[in-house]
Amino acid sequence: MSWVIWIGGSPAAERSAVVRAAAAELQQLDETIAVLELDEIRKIIAPSPRGTERESYIVYRALAYLAGILSEHGVPVIIDAATHGSGWRDLARAAIPRFAEIETEPGATVAEATARVARLARELTDIAAPGPEPPVKAPAVPGWAIWITGRPGSGKSTLARRVTDALAARGMHASVLDHVGARRFLVGNGAIVEAEEDIVHRALAYAAKRLTEAGLPVIVDATAPRRVWREVARTLIPSFAEVQLLCPVEVCLERERAVHWGLTAGREGRCPVTASAPNIVLGYEDSFRPDLMLRTDLHEVWDSVDQILALVQRLARRRHRRRASSERRLP
């Protein structure tokens, strides 16, 4: 768990200049610091803005969601966002254990405000990990992301869990992002329109992007019935792969009914379902170019896990080749 500092204030108070200066100073000690700018996030997760109060509500919640996810996975975060009132910062404070806020003030110099942020960051770091100052970190090698998609009942959560366990046994700890958690934080559990689901899925893709930029491997567990939502992640993340789970609709429905009636306890057949509630999706769009296709009604779970682990190895090799090529191009 790391920390989050929300820097607010008006443009006249040079808020963004303070954010940039503070991030540059703190990155001398920690290369994984992430800066979340509200305007950038809004462009990515709400590219066709409707300008409604509801949309603004979800975008601000997405900002807190992203900061919480990064902090939870050990990435310090600086937020650059002005707000009207303290409600959104209160939301972040409630969701993030080590959270602080600073309001930039007109008349204060950038250097003075930057020094305040640096002091606060050191205090939060001491709370997070008391003791001697940590050594300087090497620049992170960008991580990879795998999106496991398929109809409800196809076995996504089971595979995500099994793959994560298999990677952990090999000394690689992957972060798992799931649609259920993102949707609950952004909009709650009630019915929502597709435009809001679009924001939720884009926020999920953007969270995966920022985690990979910090050097972390990511597994996304989400049906994402619209093909374009998975393509957003492919566009944002250089080392990305999509795993398409194929399973007859009637088998998926049978599994979902079994979950609903509590009939799956103790069963470990082909891709058992571990969801806590039934879920039906109409109009699911299969991928046009999956990096891996798995028949979960035919393959044993261990075979599917092995194939995904082989895909992880290919992603890792591709990532290192890309890094080596970039280094050769440097003057």
Image (spheres, grey):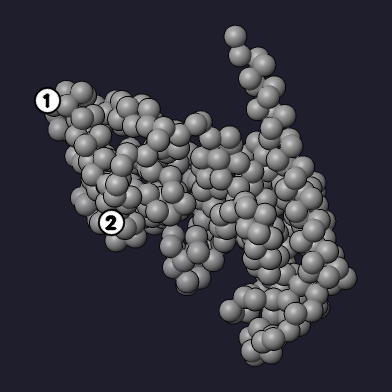
> Is residue 39 among what the camera can see?
no
> Which image quarter holds the C terminus?
top right
Task: Name the amino acid type tagged 2.
Answer: Arg
Residue 240: give x, y in percent of width and height. 68, 43
Decide if residue 267 is on the left or right side of residue 20.
right
Decide if residue 30 is on the left or right side of residue 205.
left
Residue 90: give x, y in percent of width and height. 25, 56
Task: Return the residue found at the far right.
Answer: 298
- Tell which tag, 2 or 1, sits nearer the viewer: 2
Decide if residue 239 is on the left or right side of residue 87.
right
> Is residue 69 among what the camera can see?
yes
How many numbered markers are drawn?
Answer: 2
Q: Nearer the viewer, residue 25 or 152?
A: 25
Residue identifier under label 2: 93
Task: Name the amino acid type tagged 1.
Answer: Gly
Mark 2–mark 1 distance (CA, rounded to whole Å): 27 Å
Q: Residue at x 25, y 34 (%)?
A: 118
Q: Above or below — where is 40 with respect to 328?
A: below
Residue identifier under label 1: 107
Disc 2 on helix, strand or loop? helix
Mark identifier at residue 290: none
Q: Nearer the viewer, residue 312 or 188?
A: 312
Residue 56: give x, y in percent of width and height. 38, 50
Q: Above or below — where is 107 with respect to 186?
A: above
Q: Residue at x 37, y 39 (%)?
A: 134
Q: Residue at x 29, y 61 (%)?
A: 94
Report crowding for label 2: few under 14, some 14 to 19, many 20 or more residues within 10 A (C-alpha). some
Report crowding for label 1: few under 14, some 14 to 19, many 20 or more residues within 10 A (C-alpha). few
Q: Residue at x 40, y 53 (%)?
A: 1
Which is nearer the N-term, disc 2 or disc 1? 2
